[in-house]
Amino acid sequence: MNYSLLAPEMLIALTGLLLLISGLILAGRGQRLVGIISVVLLVAVLLLVVVRFSESAVFFNGVYQVDTFANFFKALFLIAAVLVMLSAGKYTQRFEQKQSEFYALMVFATLGMMVMAAAGDLITIYIGLELMTVSFYILTAYLLNDEASSEAGLKYLILGAISSAILLFGMSLLFALSGTTVISEIAGQVSRQPALIAGIILMIVGFGFKIAAVPFHMWAPDIYQGAPIPVTTYLAVGSKAAAFAALLRIFMIALPPGQFNWSLVLAILAAITIIVGNLIALNQTNVKRMLAYSSIAQAGYILAGLVAANAYGLKGVLFYAMLYVFCNTGAFAVATAVETDTGSTDRVAFNALGKRSPMLAAIMTVCLLSLAGIPPMAGFAGKFYLFSGAIQAGYLWLAFIGLLMSMISVYYYLLVAKAMYIGESDREDIIDIKLPARFALWVCLLATILIGVYPAPLSNLAQTAIQMFL
Amino acid sequence: MIGFTHYLILSTILFGIGMYGVISKRNAVAVLMSVEIMLNAVNINFIAINKFIRSETGIGQLFAIFVIVVAAAEVAVGLALIIAIYRQKKSVNLNDFNLLKW
């Protein structure tokens, strides 16, 4: 076994510990260094993952798998973490003396996600999942003096714990029927029987909580609104993608769709998620909350790709998860800048942003249009893959619902654009953005447009990553 | 003779009790305890499977130990959060936490 392939995970773990220690050494003004150290180290690990993208190995009798699928998601998490840390910038001053722990916890959450994406065993998935969510419980409640933040943290903890318990019960049933926890060995051991159906349903419920699919979505808007906004960004982008990675691996390898017919259940779940997420987003006045409901709807679109379970659909899942990182981080980064400036994320706070800071307004508009799926932004290409996959698999009605609700979603995304360009505000001063945040915003903008105009490279990458499922 | 089915029935009942507690209890600490009951129901499942189905390996027991360890970490964070929120509101009643609502 080539243990050097585990280097990214080990380095990330060491980075987290290093950040904890350096926070003790660099007290006071030195805290700013911690952010720089963490970004540099994460970029280094990202390069390592990209360079060794196509190498694969199975460790410890299948407990841990390094393959292109895992590497794709690892790169995704690292990109998201770096962008979030860069765009957090000024906002971290609210954490006062606790900045270094903030970065350390972000790094540990990233480690949890990476373990989830590469897990080849139910136990490993559970450990990765909990490492990620426990870090997020703390991060969500990080603004200790803010009542909404603590409340969000407690709510997330309770609902997260319930969902893990349900997921575990499902896993225990699967383990009882197959006698093994290694995902690749489960497939040959189980047959169709009532207990298996119960196990599958429980696992869908457990993962449904994590990806915030309706009807297991009630926690998402509250937590997204209450949490510090960089945490919200990472929660929306990273933890969702990690849950999808684990979901894909379990459902495509342990319970192959040809053998077990779970796709209709997921199709109904996806349809409800798309409809409810978009409809409730329509009458939200807080942009953070609107983005929360929109992210519920986006989870529904991605789920449609898993329902299809063919080359197009699965490619779409990975493709969409990646471009979602850029558009969502871009939109949230603008919201972060606005919140740091005005102290609020109500839609009124975005009024006249087009005059105050044309760059922020332009990036917000591009990212929102991409989320709505308007060509030539990246979102269009992603939805094209997802829905054509669904149509190929015979789920024409699901693709129709997806397209219809995408049309409706344009309305609430454009309400924000309307506030930014037509809205009146008594403030005329320019919003000051620091260089790192500016860089992150430009990366999000360029990636959103470039992937939309020229989707082939990312699409090919996603194609190689899903080869093992086909 | 007590067999595998009895253990499964016990764990399912415990899981249901835990779920009921989570939904009906208003005290945050009681809710955390109910979650603990749910996790322990899962542990019973794993140990029973290990004994009756795959006794030659220790995977079920291993899984149970991981669940116990993680649950301890989760409760530590949970109690810390409850203390933090108690300092602000002087209450641990979930009905008092109503800032965030749709």
Image (cartoon, coloured by chain):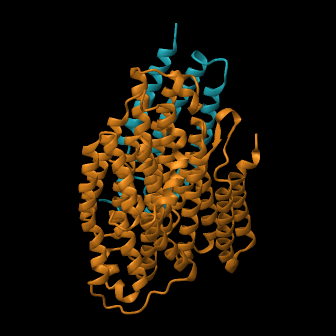
Name the residue located 33 percent from the left edge and 48 percent from the top edge.
Answer: A214
Measured along the vertical axis of the image, is residue A432 above or below residue A82? below
Quarter-wise, where is residue A23 in the image? Answer: bottom right
Name the residue located 33 percent from the left edge and 59 percent from the top edge.
Answer: A293
In the rendered view, does A212 fall on the left or right side of A1? left
Q: Position of residue B90 (x, y in %)?
A: 44, 60
Measured along the vertical axis of the image, is residue B48 above or below residue B89? above
Q: Position of residue A186 (x, y in %)?
A: 54, 27
Using the image as rendered, state which of residue A283 and residue A416 is in the foreground. Answer: A416
Q: Position of residue A40 (x, y in %)?
A: 68, 69
Using the image as rendered, state which of residue A443 and residue A459 is in the foreground. Answer: A459
Residue A340 seen in this snapshot? yes
Residue A292 seen in this snapshot? no
Question: Which of the chains is cyan?
Answer: B
Question: Which of the chains is orange?
Answer: A
Using the image as rendered, state which of residue A409 and residue A383 is in the foreground. Answer: A383
